[in-house]
Each structure stands twice: as structure tokens, then as C-alpha cells.
């Protein structure tokens, strides 16, 4: 479904990604884990076209999407939930979801998708008329995911969905991610919470200062000694 | 849908009646010529301030050179009438189009970038336009200015009334167009850019396109305001369009509330009147003005209206749905 080949990204003179390559197959949950500044967000940004590539290719659904503008990439069903949620704080929950369906014109289908989002996130239904900025952190994350679902993604890029959330909410969000995956959406998940990410993912890639240093089944990596030491606290 | 249409018809009717009534009052002399002039000037200021609010308040891109756009519209319209002997209304529209073209070419390189670049570029642009107007002596009359721009009518007794009527009619038209635009899907895209550019982008919104649309339309409206200013005033001078003039519009927008059409209308009228009122203490105006702004920023940082709109439907009768159209006539 998605293949990234030899990505090289520079911020000014700083070489941020070194020949990053990986693959996401249909229906998988893939996670990229790594410490702060290891290039996880940069990788997602370069896939969705926000950050320009120095070299390398991004192939999505058998088409080369390298260098295509971000808003066009969304049309193909590759949707990113940006880091820090970035919901529209002054719009209501309902309006935020409407924005998610911006590229679509099928009114009756959109209506059905509201119901899908509201059954996934009953809390959002309760707060439909409330301004996005007044929601709690967990609810905002749910709204950000719900908004992305409104554009009917085939591949969802999630950037640090657990950021700043209480452990109970983290569990809830991860359950929802699994649920979304079961409904047929492929997921590329970027996380610092390596333990949770490895628990739900099929496969994982480990990023260190812009290079992929390890890859394998999530379950294997979870038991790998060096991974344990570096990311799972012993 | 039907209540929306009904509200719109009621409001349109009310605005037209109010406009005709005030025009008649000016004509028979109940409202004196001086007050009529202030009201007309306020109408022009509101038009230009609305155009600034479109790009700054609704799209979230700070622009500091709207006096420059106003100048282009004013001079272009005046030159069309005086040099090329085009009809007045055609000249006004043409002036607005010329301004929009300038807006397009300034927006193109700067709106690709996010941040404060637009503010810096428009600031410089406003000054450049002023200097060009001083030096293009053959067309603009240079520093001496352009005199004898034809008004809406040659009949001197009718002039104040007709200027008022046409300017306010144009203002109402601008309000209607902006209100409808902002409540369409285009408007939602524009507002989402103000809220969060990255999020808008990841929703599949072509951020650059909508910024360009908003900025070009903003320039068009500012140019229209400039043209009306020229015909109403009858005289143009480059110093009328200096940086302080651009600041005046920023002040109107901030005071009325970024992202509120009715807020801009209210603060436009209040501030224009205040400027005339403070004319007795000319030099202190620039002390009192910032002071008022300071007070507002301290006690009401979101401006008079915030991003809300004043709605007749919320004054009379039960609160209508958010989608129900509501504008302030005059």
C-alpha cells in the first residue's frame, strides 16, 4: 500500500533523514518508534508532502506521489492526523468534522460517516455543539482522529496520538486505533510510547537520529534486549 | 432553508428602506451636509476595513498596506474617468479590477510562505505605491494631486445625497457578498486556514489557493473603496494614502473584532465619527486613538464583537439557528 524508498530530508544544512526505507502492507498497523528528534514526524511529513524531499521516493497505491502537494495527496485517501491534534479550536465539534469531509461531495454518505464517528466516539456526540478548544486533551485527540476519518482514509498516519494524555485515555485511544484498523483502515503510527505502540502493531521500525536501525515483528521487538533497554525501560 | 431566505429578504428590505430614508433625510436637510459627509466617509472606511478583515480577520494573514490598494483603486478609477472618459461606474469597477491584479501579483510570491512575510511585503508595497503616485506626474498630478474628479452627479445640491446613497449601497453589497462567501464551503476553507494551516492542509484544503482567492478579493474590495473615495472626495493626493491610513484600517478591524463583519461596520462608523469629533484637538488625536486601542486590548482583547456577528434575529424573537443569515443594515 505504501512504500518509502531512500528518503533523504534536509532542514537547511542539517541532514534529518538518511536513506529511510520501509513498507506498509494493506490492513497492517505499522509503527515507527524512536526518541525525540529521531525523525519520526519528519518521516510522516515527507510522506504527506509537507516537507520537501532531497531524494527518495514515496509510492502509494502503486503511484509515485513524491513531490505532490499535500492537499492532493489527501484526495487519494492518505490522511495525516498531525502531531499535537491541531483541531480548529474556534469551530464546534460538528464543524470540525465537517472540515474533515471537505474534499467530499456525497452528502448522504457524509451523513452516515458522522454516525460512524459518533458511535466510535460517543463523547464527541455529547459535545457536538461545543467549541473544539473547550474539549479535554483526550477528547481533542478523538476529534482529530474523527475528523481524519471523515475524509474516508485508506491509510491513516497518526503522529503521537498519546501525547500529553493520561494513561487511561492512552489505553482508550489505542483501543480505538485498533478498532479503526479492524474496519479496514491501514495505519502508520508514530509513537514515543514504544510499549503501547508495539502492543498493537503488526510490525515496527526503529528510528535513531534519522536512520532506521532495526525492524521486525512488533512482538519480537518487544522482547528484544536492546530495544527493551533503550525504549521500554529495562 | 426557507427561514434563511425569509430572514435575508427581511434584512435586504430593511437595509434598502433605511438607506432610502437616510438619503431622503439628507436631501431635505434634516441631516446636514457635514454629517452626511462623515457618514459617507465612514461607508468608504467600512468597505476598505471589511476588505482588510477578509484577509486578516478571516484568513489570518496580517496585511499592512491596504491604503496602497485603496490608492490604486482611487487613482485608476479617477484616471479612467478623466483621461479615458469612461463612464463613472465602469471606471469604479475597472479600478477595482486593476487593484485585484496588483493584489494577485503581490500575493503570488508571498502567500506561499506562512508567517509575517505578507505583513512586511504589504507594508513596503503601500509605501512604494505612494512614491510612484508622487512621481507619475503626467497621470496622477504628482504631489500636487489630482483635482476635479467628477462626482456621481453634476448637480451640487444633489451631490451629498447621491454620494451617500451610492457609497452605502456599495457597502451593503460588499457586506452581502462577504457574508455569503464566508458561509459557503469556500468560507469554511478560508476560516480553517486562520484556525490552523497545517490541519487545513491535512484536510485536503489547498491553502495557497484559498489564501490567494481571499487576498485578491480583498484587494478588489479595497480598490472599489478607493474608487468611491475618489469620486466622493473629488480630489486625490498621494499623502492621503500613507502608512497611517493603512493603520486606521487595522485599528477599525481590530477594534471591531477580527473575523466579524458587523463588528467592522460598527467600529468603522464609530471611529470615523470619532476622528471628526477629535479634529478640534488634531495633534492629540494620535494620543487619544492609541489610548482607546490600549483600553480595548486590555479589557476586550477580542475586539467589540470578537468573531461573533450582531444578528437582528437574536434581538427580536427566539434565537435562530447559527446558520440563519443576519447583518446590520445601517
Image (cartoon, rainbow, N blue to C red):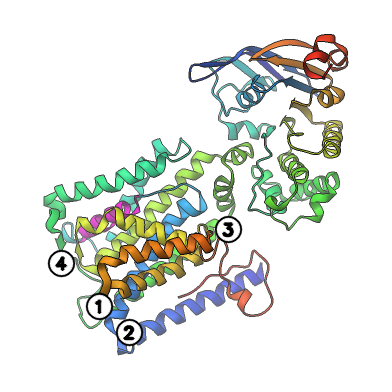
- Residue B148's mark? 4
Please check whether the numbered discs 4 and 3 fall on a single chain.
yes
Question: Residue under circle 2?
Answer: B26
Residue plotted at (36% across, 82% down) = B23
Chain of the residue on which disc 1 is drawn: B
Gap between marks 4 and 2, in whole Å?
Answer: 23 Å
Give how far across and how far down residue B305 sits, in percent. Answer: 54, 65
Read off the residue under disc 1. Answer: B159
**Disc on res. B126:** none
**Tags 2 and 3 touching, CB below 8 Å:** no
Secondary structure mostly seen in magenta is helix
Report which residue position mark 3 lands on: B183
Q: Position of residue B245 (x, y in %)?
A: 31, 58
Residue B292's spot in the image, x, y percent? 42, 65
Q: Earlier in the sequence, mark 4 or mark 2?
A: 2
Secondary structure, mark 2, is helix
The span shown in magenta is B65-81
Of label 1 and label 4, which has the lower sequence position? 4
Disc 1 vs disc 4: Cβ atoms closer than 8 Å? no
Q: Which chain carries label 4?
A: B
Q: Image check: B272 left or right of A104?
A: left
From the viewer's side, name the closer residue of A2 and B314: B314
Amino acid at each position: 500500500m505504501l512504500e518509502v524508498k531512500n528518503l533523504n530530508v534536509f532542514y537547511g544544512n542539517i541532514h534529518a533523514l538518511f536513506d529511510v526505507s520501509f513498507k506498509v502492507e494493506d490492513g497492517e498497523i505499522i509503527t515507527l518508534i524512536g526518541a525525540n528528534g529521531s525523525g519520526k514526524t519528519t518521516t510522516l511529513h515527507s510522506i504527506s508532502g509537507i516537507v520537501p524531499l532531497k531524494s527518495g521516493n514515496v509510492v502509494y497505491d502503486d503511484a509515485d506521489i513524491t513531490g505532490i502537494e499535500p492537499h492532493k495527496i489527501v484526495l487519494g485517501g492518505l490522511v495525516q492526523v498531525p502531531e499535537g491534534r491541531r483541531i480548529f479550536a474556534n469551530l464546534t465539534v460538528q464543524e470540525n468534522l465537517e472540515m474533515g469531509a471537505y474534499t467530499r461531495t456525497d452528502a448522504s454518505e457524509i451523513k452516515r460517516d458522522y454516525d460512524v464517528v459518533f458511535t466510535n466516539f460517543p463523547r464527541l456526540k455529547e459535545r457536538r455543539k461545543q467549541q473544539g478548544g473547550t474539549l479535554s486533551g483526550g477528547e481533542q485527540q478523538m476529534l482529530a482522529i474523527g475528523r481524519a476519518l471523515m475524509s474516508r482514509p485508506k491509510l491513516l498516519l497518526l503522529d503521537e496520538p498519546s501525547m500529553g494524555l493520561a494513561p487511561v485515555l492512552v489505553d482508550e485511544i489505542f483501543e480505538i486505533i485498533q478498532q479503526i484498523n479492524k474496519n479496514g483502515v491501514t495505519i502508520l503510527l508514530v509513537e514515543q510510547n514504544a510499549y503501547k505502540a508495539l502492543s498493537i502493531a503488526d510490525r515496527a521500525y526503529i528510528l535513531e537520529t534519522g536512520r532506521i536501525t532495526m525492524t521486525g515483528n512488533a512482538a519480537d521487538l518487544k522482547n528484544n534486549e536492546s530495544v527493551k533497554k533503550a525504549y521500554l525501560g529495562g | 432553508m426557507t427561514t434563511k431566505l425569509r430572514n435575508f429578504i427581511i434584512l435586504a428590505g430593511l437595509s434598502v428602506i433605511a438607506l432610502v430614508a437616510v438619503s431622503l433625510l439628507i436631501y431635505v436637510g434634516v441631516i446636514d451636509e457635514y454629517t452626511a459627509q462623515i457618514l459617507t466617509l465612514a461607508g468608504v472606511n467600512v468597505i476598505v476595513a471589511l476588505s482588510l478583515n477578509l484577509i486578516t480577520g478571516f484568513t489570518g494573514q496580517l496585511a499592512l498596506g491596504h491604503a496602497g490598494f485603496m490608492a490604486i483603486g482611487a487613482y485608476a478609477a479617477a484616471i479612467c474617468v478623466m483621461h479615458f472618459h469612461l463612464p463613472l461606474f465602469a471606471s469604479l469597477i475597472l479600478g477595482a479590477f486593476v487593484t485585484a491584479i496588483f493584489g494577485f501579483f503581490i500575493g503570488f510570491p508571498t502567500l506561499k510562505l506562512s508567517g509575517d512575510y505578507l505583513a512586511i511585503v504589504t507594508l513596503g508595497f503601500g509605501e512604494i505605491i505612494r512614491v510612484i503616485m508622487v512621481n507619475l506626474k503626467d497621470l496622477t498630478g504628482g504631489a500636487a494631486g489630482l483635482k476635479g474628479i467628477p462626482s456621481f452627479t453634476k448637480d451640487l445640491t444633489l451631490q451629498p445625497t447621491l454620494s451617500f446613497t451610492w457609497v452605502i449601497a456599495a457597502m451593503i453589497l460588499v457586506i452581502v457578498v462577504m457574508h455569503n462567501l464566508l458561509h459557503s464551503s469556500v468560507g469554511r476553507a478560508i476560516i480553517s486556514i486562520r484556525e490552523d494551516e497545517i490541519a487545513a492542509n491535512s484536510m485536503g484544503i489547498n491553502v495557497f489557493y484559498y489564501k490567494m482567492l481571499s487576498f485578491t478579493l480583498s484587494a478588489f474590495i479595497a480598490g472599489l473603496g478607493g474608487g468611491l473615495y475618489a469620486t466622493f472626495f473629488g480630489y486625490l493626493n498621494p499623502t492621503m494614502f500613507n502608512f497611517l491610513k493603512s493603520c486606521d484600517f487595522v485599528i477599525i478591524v481590530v477594534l471591531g473584532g477580527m473575523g466579524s463583519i458587523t463588528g467592522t461596520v460598527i467600529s468603522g462608523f464609530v471611529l470615523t465619527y470619532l476622528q471628526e469629533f477629535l479634529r478640534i484637538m488634531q495633534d492629540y488625536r494620535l494620543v487619544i486613538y492609541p489610548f482607546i486601542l490600549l483600553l480595548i486590548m486590555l479589557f476586550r482583547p477580542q475586539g467589540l464583537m470578537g468573531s461573533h456577528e450582531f444578528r437582528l434575529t437574536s434581538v427580536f424573537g427566539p434565537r435562530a439557528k447559527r446558520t440563519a443569515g443576519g447583518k446590520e443594515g445601517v
